[in-house]
């Protein structure tokens, strides 16, 4: 019951709290519920085809029991949790053993059916139909993105539509004993080649296609033993960057030499319990490299992974963080100090910050937010 009632986001395990809105900010929440339900059904239809052959497993056998458990563990997270993406990893984890069990069951289905004469063509027809449905899904794939309602959403329906058409022809031809084997074969073949669904176009996620950069360390400097300094003039004398410090892209993440130098300095000088505020709220690399907590960072991930208790606070913190380029106001200082912020990381000109500059280069300025600023 703890899991079934009490969570609506993966951030703090509050499954389905907030019905009927499902956490969707819409003027009419009922539309959000319908959209969430339809999306969940589509995901379920995309998961099940791999398990289609398990209907041929002997009833009350260990293999059948295992198959039922794998199917339930694949589908249940999609229906119970509400994050919408990471629940699919359960289905991915179950895919390999399900594929084996499905192949075993499919072999039993065909072996139990007397395939003679003209009926020998149906295994080949079913296989070809599965390949066609996968090809159609591949052609639909580049027509849109996964975070919007486009023709791509029809992809999970195609194997079922094609399988139903072929099964209907089998029924009309009077070959009804072949109905289940044909249905299962179309679905399994579609699932088996599903990995190649992007053959006709990109997956639509920049992070999956960005070049992978092999680097020894994103924060290495020429002298790792060099002591940090709080003198702005001394800190601005940038060391000669090593090859690992050149501007780079790791996936979709841009990481410049200026950010690298600032992150290295701050990591060497900040304490473990310190908190950093930055106007680069989309960045997740900054806290990862600096290794301290942030007032707000990784903004695109907040909706998926953030705690419900912080949902109202995120836009407030975003506004204060982005306003750092315009300087500090009594209101923003009070908010930052109340949250325990110790450092400010600002990219872009900012003339309204009176806190002392402790590091600066061409791209980044780091300020120390002291008790004296907080007391004003």
Image (cartoon, helix red, strand yellow):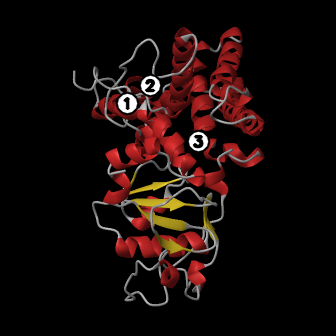
Residue placed under numbered mark 1 in the picture: 308
At 59% from the left edge and 30% from the top edge, which residue is drawn? 187
Residue placed under numbered mark 3 in the picture: 192
Residue 291 falls in which quadrant of the image? bottom left
At 55% from the left edge and 25% from the top edge, which residue is drawn? 45
Report, in whole angstroms, how far the alpha carbon at label 2 lies from the one at label 3. Answer: 17 Å
Residue 57 falls in which quadrant of the image? top left
Kindly state the secondary structure of the residue where label 1 is placed: helix
Q: Position of residue 222 (x, y in %)?
A: 49, 89
Q: Is residue 293 above or below residue 24?
A: below
Report, in whole angstroms, how far the alpha carbon at label 3 lies from the one at label 1. Answer: 38 Å
Task: Specify the quadrant that holds the N terminus.
Answer: top left
Residue placed under numbered mark 2 in the picture: 55
Q: Nearer the viewer, residue 308 or 57?
A: 308
Q: Position of residue 205 (x, y in %)?
A: 64, 47
Q: Is residue 49 above or below residue 319?
A: above
Q: Is residue 320 above or below residue 120?
A: below
Q: Which mark is residue 198?
A: none
Q: Nearer the viewer, residue 188 or 88?
A: 88
Kindly state the secondary structure of the residue where label 3 is placed: helix
Q: Earlier in the sequence, mark 3 or mark 1?
A: 3
- The residue mark sitting in front, 2 or 3, is 3
- The residue mark sitting in front, 2 or 1, is 1
Kindly state the secondary structure of the residue where label 2 is placed: helix
Report, in whole angstroms, how far the alpha carbon at label 2 lies from the one at label 1. Answer: 41 Å
Q: Earlier in the sequence, mark 2 or mark 3?
A: 2
């Amino acid at each position: 019951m703890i899991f079934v009632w009490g969570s609506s986001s993966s951030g703090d395990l509050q499954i389905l709290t907030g019905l009927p809105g499902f956490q969707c900010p819409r003027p009419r929440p009922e539309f959000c519920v319908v959209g969430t339900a339809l999306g969940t059904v589509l995901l379920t239809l995309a998961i099940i085809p791999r398990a289609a052959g398990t209907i041929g497993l002997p009833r009350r056998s260990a293999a059948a029991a295992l198959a039922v458990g794998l199917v339930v563990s694949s589908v249940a997270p999609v229906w119970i949790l509400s994050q919408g993406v990471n629940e699919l990893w359960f289905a991915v984890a179950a895919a390999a053993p399900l594929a084996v069990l499905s192949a075993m069951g499919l072999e039993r289905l065909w072996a139990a059916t007397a395939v003679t004469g003209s009926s020998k063509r149906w295994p080949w027809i079913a296989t070809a139909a599965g390949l066609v449905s996968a090809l159609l899904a591949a052609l639909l794939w580049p027509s849109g993105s996964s975070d919007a309602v486009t023709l791509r959403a029809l992809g999970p329906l195609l194997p079922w539509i094609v399988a139903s058409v072929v099964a209907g022809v089998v029924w009309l031809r009077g070959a009804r004993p072949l109905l289940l084997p044909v249905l299962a074969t179309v679905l399994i073949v579609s699932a088996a080649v599903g990995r190649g669904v992007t053959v006709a176009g990109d997956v639509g996620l920049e992070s999956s296609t960005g070049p992978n950069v092999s680097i020894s360390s994103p924060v290495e400097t020429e002298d790792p033993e060099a002591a940090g300094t709080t003198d702005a003039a001394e800190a601005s004398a940038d060391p000669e960057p090593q090859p690992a410090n050149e501007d780079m892209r790791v996936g979709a993440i841009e990481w410049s030499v200026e950010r690298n130098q600032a992150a290295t300095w701050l990591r060497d000088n900040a304490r473990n319990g310190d908190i950093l505020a930055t106007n680069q709220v989309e960045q997740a690399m900054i806290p990862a490299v600096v290794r301290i907590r942030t007032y707000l960072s990784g903004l695109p991930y907040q909706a998926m992974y953030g705690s419900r208790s912080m949902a109202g606070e995120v836009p407030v913190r975003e506004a204060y963080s982005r306003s750092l380029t315009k300087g500090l106001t009594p209101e923003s200082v009070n908010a930052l100090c109340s949250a325990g912020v110790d450092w400010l990381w600002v990219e872009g000109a900012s003339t309204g910050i009176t806190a002392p500059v402790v590091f600066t280069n061409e791209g980044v300025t780091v300020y120390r937010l002291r008790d004296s600023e907080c007391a004003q």
